[in-house]
């Protein structure tokens, strides 16, 4: 009796294992629902050389501008603080002269940045392959001009704010452009 019970239990377990193994095999054999595919080759196409070169230029301008803005922030605050002290007659004449010289150097550097940004924006306006990205970069030369105007008016911290807006526009442009090696 015990032997038949044991054999029956063994037979039931063997059958259960065989059924689960066969269920797994059939699950593997049945492919998932697939949509019909065509035999067209999908290859990633590179964006035009003009777009790739422009992306490098935008990246370079962003790098240069970021380096300038990071150094310019403390300088702008220092210039304005010295201007405030000069109005209150708290500093020497030599410091006032040095501050005026620094202001002129900063304004000249801002003009140099402005020229590069104008050139970059005009390239996006004139080249057909780049016109698609123009809305992202449009206005950087105006913002750079506002920065020069603010600095000329003695508002150097406000000039830095305009440059940060240019940074954002350049970053937005890089995000919109395809990332491909030159």
Image (cartoon, rainbow, N blue to C red):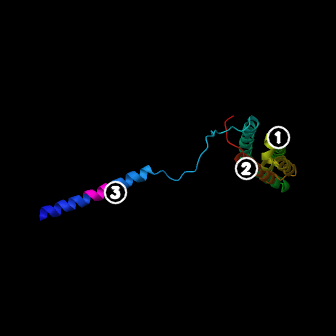
Q: Nearer the viewer, mark 3 or mark 1?
A: 3
Looking at this view, is 132 or 97 the one in front?
A: 132
Mark 2 or 3: the one toward you = 3
State which mark lies toward you, 2 or 1. Answer: 1
Q: Is residue 29 left or right of residue 143?
A: left
Alpha carbon separation for disc pair 2 and 3: 56 Å
Asked whether residue 165 appears in the rendered view, the answer is yes
Residue 103 lies in the magenta-colored region = no
Residue 43 vertical position relative to residue 156 in the rendered view, above or below: above
**CB within 8 Å, label 2 to label 3:** no
Label 1 packing within 10 angstroms: few (<14), some (14-19), many (20+) = few
Residue 172: numbered disc: 2
Magenta stretch in the rendered image: 14-18
Residue 16 belongs to magenta span: yes
Residue count near mark 3 (Cα–Cα under 10 Å), binned few <14, some 14–19, many ≥20: few
Q: Are marks 2 and 1 in contact (CB under 8 Å)?
A: no
Q: Residue at x 65, y 39 (%)?
A: 44
Q: Is residue 126 left or right of residue 167?
A: right
Q: Position of residue 119 (x, y in %)?
A: 83, 39
Q: Earlier in the sequence, mark 2 or mark 3?
A: 3
Disc nearer the start of the sequence (3/1): 3
* Residue 109 shows up from this direction: no
Q: Residue at 67% across / 42% down in the picture?
A: 179
Label 1, on which residue? 128
Most foreground residue, 1 or 114: 1
Q: Which mark is residue 20?
A: 3
**Mark 3–mark 1 distance (CA, rounded to whole Å):** 63 Å
The residue at 70%/48% (across/down) is 175
Crowd rating for badge 2 (residues with CA inside 10 Å; few <14, some 14–19, many 20+): some
Q: Earlier in the sequence, mark 2 or mark 1?
A: 1
């Amino acid at each position: 009796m015990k032997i038949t019970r044991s054999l029956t239990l063994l037979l039931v377990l063997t059958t259960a294992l065989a059924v689960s193994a066969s269920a797994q095999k059939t699950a593997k054999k049945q492919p998932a629902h697939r949509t019909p595919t065509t035999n067209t080759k999908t290859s990633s196409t590179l964006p035009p050389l003009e777009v790739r070169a422009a992306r490098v230029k935008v990246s370079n301008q962003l790098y240069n501008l970021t380096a300038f803005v990071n150094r310019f922030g403390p300088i702008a605050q220092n210039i304005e603080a010295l201007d405030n002290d000069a109005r209150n007659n708290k500093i020497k004449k030599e410091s006032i002269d040095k501050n005026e010289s620094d202001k002129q150097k900063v304004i000249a550097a801002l003009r140099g940045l402005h020229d590069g940004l104008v050139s970059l924006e005009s390239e996006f306006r004139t080249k057909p392959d780049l016109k698609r990205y123009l809305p992202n970069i449009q206005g950087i030369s105006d913002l750079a001009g506002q920065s020069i105007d603010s600095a000329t008016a003695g508002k150097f911290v406000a000039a830095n704010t305009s440059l940060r807006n240019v940074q954002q526009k350049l970053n937005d442009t890089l995000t919109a452009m395809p990332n491909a090696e030159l």
